[in-house]
Image (cartoon, rainbow, N blue to C red):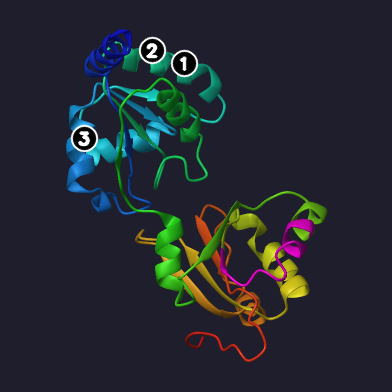
Amino acid sequence: MRGERSQEKCAQSRARSGRLFIVGVPIGHPDDLTIRARSTLRQVDVIAAKNPQSTQALLSHHGIHAVVTTYDRKNAAEKAPVLLERLKQGLHIALVSDCGMPAIYDPGRVLISAASKAHLPIEVIPGTSAVVAAVALCGMDGDSFVFEGRWSGGLRKMTRRLQALRTEPRTMIFLPPAKTLPHLLSLIMDTFGNRRVVVALDLTKTTQNVVRGRVRTVLARNSFHDTASQITLIVEGLKRRGQTAQGTV
């Protein structure tokens, strides 16, 4: 009997609490926002955004007026309990990144984990992702792939990370800062050899540029001058003897 009352109490608590929506937003072109995401952003009480300025520009493009609060790597530990309390009070909150899906190289996991532990309702509104877009675009094996996230740091750190991936057979996705791209490609050439790569600059934006080829050829083009570009680098995995690459570059 006590167990039944406890379950009933939990159910009533969940009914009164707000809902956390994990909302995917465009990686570049603002019209890639889904109909469901647009509707959700209009209806929630608060939008927790990694980059409020970027989010406000997206909302303005779609004629959405909403309360936006900052939630980023610097304040996630302090802000998550505040947002959690708002959810418990019955407010509905949308969690967004500056682009793509929250929690994919993004501090969203802190709030999502806290809401999950508190048994609060969580709903995901899928959207675009630079990682998935890159896999679709590259023409390499998409049956399995490795997302390596941001790549920066000194020569020693990047060299160690690449050496650990020398025998990785799956397609690899990197998000290097534009200013380090030529250096990273040179390290890939030294560590992996002349692998096939695809460099996608500013995916889905009007400035999008996709460069394909083997590392030596891509480096020779020397076309990576805009350090403000968003870079997605796709690198072919190690091919075993007798295994052929899918497609040609």
Disc 1 to disc 2: CB gap under 8 Å: yes
Q: Which residue is mark 2?
A: 85
Residue 174 pos. (x, y %): 58, 59
For label 2, the SS is: helix
Question: How far apart are the two marked residues, 2 and 3, measured between alpha carbons?
Answer: 20 Å
Label of residue 81 in the image: 1
Give the residues in magenta. 160-172
Assess disc 2: are there few (<14), some (14-19) or many (≥20) residues with their C-alpha within 10 Å of its C-alpha.
Answer: some
Residue 216 pos. (x, y %): 67, 80
Left or right of 66 in this view: 106? right
Q: Is residue 102 visible?
A: yes
Taking depth in this image into account, of 176 and 165 the one nearest to the observer is 165
For label 3, the SS is: helix
Left or right of 131 in this view: 161? right
**Between tags 2 and 3, which lies in front?**
2
Amino acid at circle 3:
Thr
User: In this picture, is 237 found above or below 126?
Assistant: below
Res. 215 image quadrant: bottom right
Disc 2 to disc 3: CB gap under 8 Å: no
For label 1, the SS is: helix
User: In this picture, is 226 found above or below 113?
Assistant: below
Q: Is residue 170 magenta?
A: yes
Assess disc 1: are there few (<14), some (14-19) or many (≥20) residues with their C-alpha within 10 Å of its C-alpha.
Answer: some
